[in-house]
Amino acid sequence: MIATKKLEEIIDKCGIILKFIYLPNSVLAYYTFDSDYYIILINESIRNNERLCRTVLAEEIGHYRTTIGDITPRKYMSYRDKINVDKKELLDLRWVADFIIPTDQLLSFMKATLFDPSRGLSIISILLMIWLI
């Protein structure tokens, strides 16, 4: 799994501005580009929850790596626009999943676990671990 420090290095390297601010409870973070600066805003309420903060930060960096244009969901959007936003979110989440747990590491772990019953993990345990990360 990727360390929070690695995410911070990416932010520094890419010149992304990271700020912790109070956002509505339903908003964990927001990524935007204002034609001069790339900005990630993280909800102050999750600052001390390292696991959640790392996951949210990785997801926002994923927007930086995969998204062109504004994909902020709007209250009144056409169905087609909602589908386009969902497709871009899925692309972002795929990038994040591969970044946090690279496919080769996941496969190595699964092979070692599946073929070594002494480890005591089942497929369901693996899926739960992936889901919780």
Image (cartoon, rainbow, N blue to C red):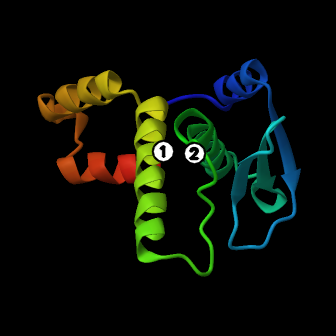
Amino acid type at image mark 1: Asp
Q: Using the numbered discs, state the Cα–Cα distance from disc 2 to disc 1 in whole angstroms.
A: 7 Å
Name the residue nearer the viewer: 87 or 53: 87
- Within the image, what quadrant is residue 46 found in? bottom right
Against 9, residue 84 (above or below) is below
Residue 54's x, y, as percent?
A: 64, 42
Determine which of the numbered discs, if any, sits on residue 59 in the image. Answer: 2
Identify the residue under disc 1: 92
Asked if disc 2 and disc 1 are in contact, CB closer than 8 Å, the reply is: yes
Residue at x 62%, y 37% (from the top left corner): 64
Amino acid type at image mark 2: Glu
Residue 122 placement, left or right of 42: left
Residue 52 placement, left or right of 9: left
Look at the numbered disc 1 and give the secondary structure of its residue. helix
Residue 119 placement, left or right of 4: left
Name the residue nearer the viewer: 116 or 103: 103
